[in-house]
Amino acid sequence: MPDLPNITADQVGQWIPAATDIREIGRGGQKVVFCGTIKGECYALKFAKAPDISDDLDTDEFSVSDTAVRAKREVEIMRECPSNHMVKLGPIGLEFAEVGEERVLYFSEELIEGKDLAEIFKASGRFAAAEIVQLGLHITDAIQALWDIGKVHRDIKPANVMCRDSNDDYVLLDAGFAFDVAGESLSAGPVGTPAYFSPEQFDFTKRRTGMDFRSDIFSLGVTMYKLLTGQHPFYSPGDTSHSMYDKIISHVPEPPSSLVEDVPNELDRIILRMIGKSPHLRYRRCTQLIEALNQV
């Protein structure tokens, strides 16, 4: 079980006096999530355990905590990334509070009314081609905006994309694993979800020279393939992690149209190009991918 902070809605109200109508809405990973209304708008309020060290996030001492440093990066990215398809920071940046002898960190982000794509897929089955094209357009916009500020998301997968109930827009979440091209890595090895890794993500020693926005394009391509066909291109139930790794590195999957009906040939070509084994086989610019999707 994840090591989650033991906090209540009453405690959240003490730490964030401006928030009203506070209630818990989820637990998972390393965070407990509440929602609350601040100045008439509803926000997600995320809490995680924090080390008992200085609140100064720029000190060397703070670098010992992966959770805290990732939270700092997640907050910075939400603040800086201009894409409407990247979740936005709420009115509270990174803060700290005491829970008995424990410390927690917390921040706010926009509350997206909707479901993540893993939930939608589980409930409704595979997505239509038109929905997949829309997904590709929206998340490629987020990938481009992240790359413009020197970041690679590194964890694009169905569970990290939500569909808004209000307009069916797709929004990318959880940039805590993002790689900063100009900064320090947040881990001594690969991070993210291996089933959605690009081949170059497995070679962590070459992350500076081998990984850029095209790694996110690969992960988005895997996500689109899975949601369109109902099958993961590189993983089947019963596969070992080693066999999955071998497939990601060397296996070329069947075109989506060979698995399901009503898939345009051009969408076949786009998705297979997105999951090309080497970055140079994928799209050289996000704008190229957006243009290709618009033509479909």
Image (cartoon, rainbow, N blue to C red):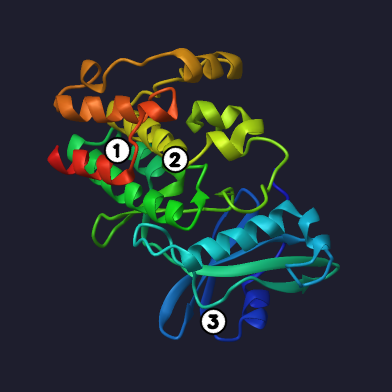
Give the answer, above or below, for where 268 lies relative to 74.
Answer: above
Q: Nearer the viewer, residue 211 or 54?
A: 211
Residue 192 visible within the image = no
Q: Return the x and y of residue 235 as percentages of the image width and height.
A: 47, 20
Q: Residue 124, labelled with which disc?
A: 1
Tell which circle, 1 or 2, labels the residue nearer the N-terminal end: 1
Residue type at tag 2: Asp
Taking the spot 64% from the left edge, 35% from the top edge, the residue there is: 190
Q: Secondary structure at mark 2?
A: helix
In the rendered view of the protein, which quadrant contains the C terminus? top left
> Which quadrant of the view contains residue 208?
top right
Taking the spot 47% from the left edge, 13% from the top edge, the residue there is: 250
Give the answer, above or below, for where 6 lies relative to 160.
Answer: below
Q: CA distance from mark 2 to mark 3?
A: 35 Å
Q: Return the x and y of residue 226 as percentages of the image width and height.
A: 36, 29
Q: Residue 216, labelled with which disc?
A: 2
Category of crowding for the residue at label 3, using alpha-carbon neighbours closer than 10 angstroms: few (below 14), some (14–19), many (at least 20): many
66 left or right, relative to 288: right
Residue type at tag 1: Ser
Tell which circle, 2 or 3, labels the residue nearer the N-terminal end: 3
Q: Nearer the viewer, residue 41 or 211?
A: 211
Category of crowding for the residue at label 1, using alpha-carbon neighbours closer than 10 angstroms: few (below 14), some (14–19), many (at least 20): few
> Which quadrant of the view contains residue 273?
top left
Residue type at tag 3: Ala
Q: Return the x and y of residue 269 as percentages of the image width and height.
A: 23, 25
Q: CA distance from mark 1 to mark 3?
A: 35 Å
Task: Residue under label 3, please give it.
Answer: 19
Q: CA distance from mark 1 to mark 2?
A: 26 Å
Give the answer, above or below, for where 94 lies relative to 176.
Answer: below
Q: Return the x and y of residue 159 as percentages of the image width and height.
A: 45, 43
